Image: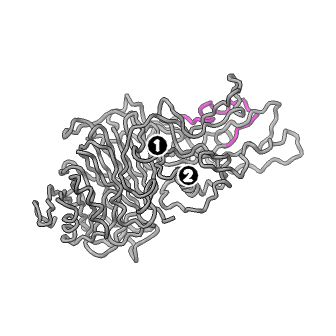
Amino acid sequence: MKLKLAALALAVGTLTPSVADAFCGFYVSNGDQKMFNDATQVVLMHMNTRTVLSMQNNYKGPPEDFALVIPVPVVLHEGDVKTLDNGVFAHVEAMGAPRLVEYWEQDPCGTGDELSKDERAFPPQAMAADSAAMGSSSSGVTIEAKFTVGEYNILILSAKDSTGLDTWLKQEKYKIPAGAEPLLRPYVESGMKFFVAKVDPKKVKFVPDTGPNQVGSATRRAALSPLRFHYDSDEFALPIRLGLANSSGTQDLIVNILAPQQRYEVANYKNVTIPTNIDVSAAMKDKFAAFYTALFDRTVEKHPGAVVTEYAWQATTCDPCPGPALDQNDFLTLGADVLGGAKGQPTLYSNADFVLTRLHARYGKDSGPGGTMIDDLRFKTAPPIAGGREFLVKPAGTDPWSQDPSNMKLEEGSTPAPENNFQGRYAIRHAWTGPVACDKPIRKRWGGQDGRMAAAPQPAMNLAFAPRGEIKLQSVVQRDVPELDLKSEVTAVIATPNPPPVGSATTPASPRPDIRPKSGCGCQTGSPSDLGGLVMGLGVFVWVRRRRAS
């Protein structure tokens, strides 16, 4: 059976697209209440025919009985479903997110021994630390399975036609959004089943809702346990059309894929990599998410219809790391315990040679990647790439024996490589402002402030709610970005005049602000050969976010 897993949310009621995220399936309510979801994250792990889906949902709305519906390729049983803790989702997001680093130029007259080679440009890697009966109904809907997991009362449905499914949900007093039936139709016709996880409000923990976009006078939101389930299927695809019924604006779809020694891209839309290794003005330190959304929007504008690769890196390492790399516990949580084995016989998968790929698309109800959304995302394997590292390359004609970094330039864009080392990385650089007390100063040696270790990078989190239209890219990027036809209007920090030599009457620049030293930025959780229990074949972390309408 082909894999067809709807990966966007269709929220029931009047869903405000400017504040809500989409997710796998759709929400249904037992009344007229507005149902909101503003932070859904999904992880799909996949190897061979095995897929493990882990999904976190944060709802907004009154504490009445509500549920979610997700198309799945096979009938699931109680042993296939479990609930999880929440922490792993933020961990995955941080690891693949675009990141901002901050470097200070080291003493041009220093010996270079103040920091080791790795500490200068490549910080060392550190250890990571129920009301329906079983059977068919007159609407052609059959309840294939029924069980309870955590706060969820779960039904697995099959349907003879989409109209019957629509009718059944309405008979069960679920409010279905207008336009849902045509979107359900292709999944019903292809033999998909439907995972209906009805929430028992007596078992739900509600917490204060202090975030934006509260629903009416609601001040609480349901803190639902994440769900995880696994199944076997053949095709690796991500249906996204189901989530369009409530969409009147623009949505973001972020997909993180974990696969052994393998990067992925889409097979049925264009692929581009995000421009990377771009130095930016210091003002972007407090506006990094706004900067990145501007860069991403410009990329999509210049490459209409493209899905953007933002990250491809070995999953248990990173450089620089925004925090501990993914480890054995993360992988087991996300499904390594059932990823191995033949069809219908899940076993532990114990290898750790996985590449984390992050793909990012932006689309709307009437305009998906490249125009009208007429097809789901279908993935294919892709060769390794590198880019976004603090790697210096020598221009043609440069002395091959020279180690002077001032004669070199950072790698730009993405290039073929023996292994995957690509990331969206952006830098703020502070030029040396002290005295230059030697005849042959060497510029462009970067590290932490006052010779200390470079601080951990700042990941761009929660991009769905980042401000848009605030950043004029050409005024903040420190170099031209030819792939975006973007001309910089500023001078790169290192191109400013050299500081005055010792004894000059010119007053040097004011001291740099103090920043607490932090540990090295690189992270590693172990080698592929010694980390038994690490996940996973192909894991897909799908994260679908609906942005404000442009």
Residues under labels 1 and 2: Cα distance? Answer: 35 Å
Q: What residue is disc 2 on?
A: 302
Q: Residue at x 34, y 69 (%)?
A: 35
| Left or right position of 94 against 399 | left
Q: Answer yes or no: is residue 101 visible.
A: no
In the picture shown, does residue 460 fall above or below 133? above
Q: Secondary structure at mark 2?
A: helix
Mark 1, residues whose alpha carbon is within 10 Å: few (<14), some, or many (≥20)? many
Q: Quadrant of residue 320?
A: top right
| Left or right position of 300 against 162 | right
Q: Residue at x 17, y 59 (%)?
A: 160
For this rendering, which residue is in front, 266 or 25? 266
The residue most toward the right is 505
Q: Secondary structure at mark 1?
A: loop
Q: Residue 236 in the image: x percent, y percent?
A: 32, 44
- The quadrant of the picture occupied by the N terminus is top left
Q: Is residue 306 magenta?
A: no
Q: Amino acid at mark 2?
A: Lys
Task: Determine the main secondary structure of the stretch shown in magenta.
Answer: loop
Point out the stretch of residues depicted in magenta.
Answer: 104-124
Colour option used: one colour
In the picture shown, does residue 22 fall above or below 98? below
| Left or right position of 483 against 251 | right
The residue most toward the top is 401
Q: What residue is disc 1 on?
A: 324
Q: Amino acid at mark 1?
A: Pro
